Image: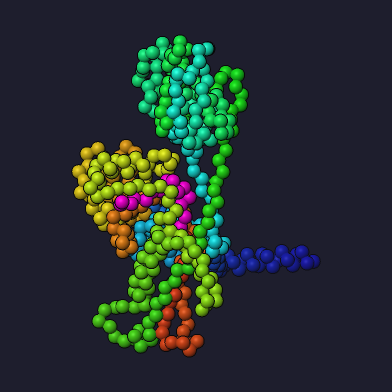
Amino acid sequence: MNTFATMRRVRNAVKWMHRNYRVVLTVLTFILVAILAFGCDAGTTAALAMAIPGTIIDGVDDGKHIVDGPLTTDLTRDGSPDLLLNEIDQHIVKIRPMATPLDQISRYGGALNAGSMFVDYYTVDTKPTTCVLDDDFDETTIQPGTAYPKVRLYTDNDEIFDKSDTILVKGVPGYAQDGVTTIAEDLVLYVCARSGSEGLMVMAVNGKRVNGVPNCVPSLDAGQKLIRMGRAASELDVMSPQYEALPTKKDNYCQIFKMQVEQSTLQRMSNKEVDWSLTDQEEAAIYDMRLGMEKSFLFGSKKRIWDADKKEYITFTGGIWGQCSKDFYYTENQFSRDKVVEMLRMAFTGNNGSKRKILIGGSKLMGYLSNLDYERIIMSRETVSKWGIDFTEIRSKFGTLYLLLSEVFDECGMSEEGIIIDPMYIQKYVHIPFNAKELDLKSSGIRNTDAVVLTEASCLVLRYPNSHMRIIKK
């Protein structure tokens, strides 16, 4: 009974839809449009939600553009990593960098965080390669016997040699196979043994015939220069004398550098002919602060003293001028091309440092260098930009030297002095990074001013003192 009723209702509905098909079609169209509209809105919303981070696309000429989203800091760092400044330090390095080259270079090199105001660090150098004879050696003391006789030599530094080392005796000619004819090669010795205060037992590699004995060590004068060369092992040798190097522990103190800038409220509110705000004063203060730090980093003396008024210790950083282990002396009359070549040779050799170094000096020293007619060395006429500083370049067979006038030397009464530094071996330690902090002096009832205090606690150290050199006028 129910089944027949249901079938009757369906037939009646079909007949109604057939008679009113236009109404049915209109309703279905409306429903379909509504469904599509809702789906598009949901899809668009989802798409926009997905596009909020944005996408970087390339422009026509190497440009970068953001699509499907706003410009964010993450996108900026991805598309143009140098656009955003990294805190205050990036702003500092752009404030008159030419005036404070040492501070500038140390900031570009990256500072190491120091967990204390007292910094311990290690330096290491190379084993000496030269020494001189302490006593004369007389070849006539060699007694007749077998070839390659062993003789004893005493030097001012026997410890730099080990068994199997070879020694170049500079300026003393070696001998041909017959032991009589001298050759272009210098005399070479072989170390057979070293025994404390008993000197070195050596044999000649290209020695002289003495008393009928071939390959003897010829006579040598005290003061003769000996140069340590490579080791020579025999076929059955498995081991060699050990070589060990131990770093030397040194220390320095971080110094707290501060500078405070204030501006009264009335001064800030007053009309001015030119725009001069607290920010402008901060920039001037940072420059003056960097100048003071530059002098401390160069010529400061490491010390910790007690201030009885403050009832606390104050630490002072040691400058790199006192950390150098090598000096080059000159006089004004002898400052010539040959002297410059000697200076370059001394700066770049014997220390295993880098082949690009920096000479920072006073105005008179730069004048001496500028007045020379360079032939054997090449002085570039174009400036070279490094670490945000423009240098004059000197090229030589020994290495490249970047020159820069530092008025700090003039202010310290050292216009004829300078220092050559190896940027690869200079390290800055920072206990308190450079920061600017606003002081609320109004609320505390001290002064009706806007105040900012600039602070940094840091020090500079030379990791490889022998790679740096002081230039001093006698």
Question: On the image, which quarter does residue 92 sit in?
Answer: bottom left
Where does the magenta region start and end? 460-474
> Foreground residue, 36 or 168?
168
Question: On the image, which quarter does residue 109 sit in?
Answer: bottom left
Whether residue 389 is situated above or below residue 88 in the rendered picture: above
Residue 187 seen anywhere in this rendered image of the structure:
yes
Q: Residue furthest right?
A: 1
Residue 283 seen anywhere in this rendered image of the structure:
no
Report the coloring of the rendering.
rainbow
Horizontal side of residue 38 vs 355, given as left or right = right
Task: Name the quadrant of the N terminus.
Answer: bottom right
Position of residue 196 measured from the top left corner of the image (x, y, whole percent): 57, 33
Q: Residue at x 55, y 56 (%)?
A: 120
> Foreground residue, 71 or 354?
354
Whether residue 170 is situated above or below residue 405 in the rendered picture: above
Position of residue 269 measured from the top left corner of the image (x, y, whole percent): 34, 86
> Foreground residue, 32 or 265?
265
> Foreground residue, 237 or 278?
237
Q: Residue at x 55, y 46 (%)?
A: 247
Position of residue 434 measured from the top left corner of the image (x, y, whole percent): 46, 66
Count every numbered label the image shows and give the total.
0
Q: Residue at x 59, y 66 (%)?
A: 17
**Magenta stretch holds residue 159:** no
Q: Residue at x 46, y 33 (%)?
A: 134
Position of residue 148 measured from the top left corner of the image (x, y, whole percent): 50, 16
